[in-house]
Image (tube, helix red, strand yellow):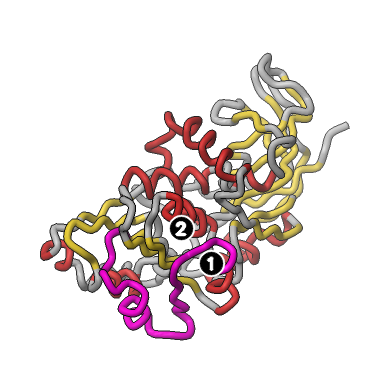
Amino acid sequence: MTQSNRRFLLAKRPVGAVRRDDFTFETVPAEAPAAGQIQVRNLYLSLDPAMRGWMNEGKSYIPPVALGQVMRALGVGEVVASNHPDYKPGDQVSGALGVQDYFTGDPQGLHKIDPRLAPLPRYLSALGMTGMTAYFALLEVGQPKAGDTVVISGAAGAVGSIVGQIAKLKGCHVVGIAGGAQKCQYLKDELGFDGVIDYKAEDVLAGLKRECSKGVDVYFDNVGGEILDAVLTRINFKARIVICGAISQYNNKEAVKGPANYLALLVNRARMEGFVVMDHAKDYGKAAQEMAGWLATGKVKSKEDVVDGLETFPETLLKLFSGENFGKLVLKV
C-alpha cells in the first residue's frame, strides 16, 4: 500500500523572517525505492538556525535549497523498505532526510543508530551534528586550556549548552550569555556554569566586567551583532574567537552588521576563526564515542525541546529566532 507523504517545498527565497507562504505544503504518494535505494519513515527532524541560511541564494559552505525542492533537514527515522544490501526494514538511521514524512533515495550520507543506547532525539542533539559542532568548534578552534575564561553566547541553546559543559570538563571558568532568568538559572544550577549574563535583563558589557574579571580567553559566538562587539572589548592577549553562528543577523533585511570593535583582535594578537562542522567529518566517530561516554556518566547533559507535528514546521522554526526554544529544537513528525 502506497503511503502519503506530506512535505514542505521551498517556494521562494525568504526576505527577513521565514513565513509559511515561503513554502508549499503538499501531500503526494511516497515514492517506492528503486534499485540501491531505501525508504525511511521520518520520526524526528532537527530544526537549526543554519536552515535559514540554506534558503538564501548565493555562495556558502553548502549549496542552497533549490526552489521547488524539499526543504533540507537532518532527521532520524526507520527504514520501512529497502533495495540496498546494507539496510533492512526496522533499521534506524540518521542523516539528511528533509522536511517530510518519508525519505526515498540513495542512503549515501545516512548512518545507522541504536535506539537502545539513547532516545532518538538525542541523535539530533548531543550525539548528532549539534554535539559534533560543540566538540570540534571548542576543542579544535577554541583550544581551551585549564584556567581559561570561556564565554558562550546562545549558551542555553543546543550547541552552546554542550560547549559550556565541555569547557568545564577542561577546567575552564565558564560564563554563559542567555535570555531570561529560567535559562540562566538552568545554566548555573543544572549545567554548572560559573557565571551567567541575562542579555534580556542587564547590560552585557556590565555583565562581562562582573563575570570575567580577568578578561576573556575564548569566546564561542552563536549570535553575532552587539554581543560580539561587547565581548571583543574584553578579550585577552592571544584570545580565540570561534564564529559558529550569528543568529541575530540571519533575518536581517539590511546588510549583516560586522564587528565594530575588530581592532581588539589586532591589539591583542587574537584570532577569530569561522567553523563548519563538515570539515571534521572524518573524526565524527571518535568524538561521538567520547560524547557518549560523557553522557553515560552524567558529565554532560542534553536537553531537547520537542514540538509535535510536521505541519507546524514554519512556525516552530521561528522559535529559534525568538529565543523561545529551550535546548535542542526537534520536530516530532
Q: Residue at x 66, y 23 (%)?
A: 37
Query: What residue is pinned by disc 2?
Result: 164
Residue found at the far left of this picture: 267
On residue 89, the disc is none
Q: Residue at x 25, y 71 (%)?
A: 234
Which residue range is magenta in the image? 189-218
**138 to 207, vertically: above or below:** above
Residue 302 seen from this side:
yes
Give how far across and how far down residue 51 sits, in percent: 51, 54
Give how far across and how far down residue 136 sits, in percent: 40, 43
Q: Image quarter for residue 308?
A: bottom right
**Is the residue under label 1 in contact with that under label 2 (CB below 8 Å)?**
yes
Q: Image quarter for residue 257?
A: bottom left
Choose between 19 and 333: the one closer to the eye. 333
Residue found at the far right of this picture: 1
Choose between 255 and 41: the one closer to the eye. 41
Query: Is 197 one of the magenta-colored residues?
Result: yes
Q: Secondary structure at mark 2?
A: helix
Q: Sort mark 1 into few (<14), some (14-19) or many (20+) by Cα contacts within 10 Å.
A: many
Give how far across and how far down residue 54 sits, in percent: 47, 51
**224 to 75, vertically: above or below:** below
Name the N-terminal-most of marks 2 and 1.
Answer: 2
Q: Work out how far the residue at label 2 is from the one at label 1, CA to CA, in angstroms.
A: 9 Å
Q: Identify which amino acid the numbered label 2 is placed on.
A: Gly
Q: Identify which amino acid the numbered label 1 is placed on.
A: Leu
Query: What residue is pinned by disc 1?
Result: 187
Give how far across and how far down residue 121 sits, in percent: 67, 47
Choose between 243 and 140: the one closer to the eye. 140
Q: Image quarter for residue 98?
A: top right
Q: Secondary structure at mark 1?
A: helix
Q: Residue at x 33, y 83 (%)?
A: 206
Residue 246 seen from this side:
no
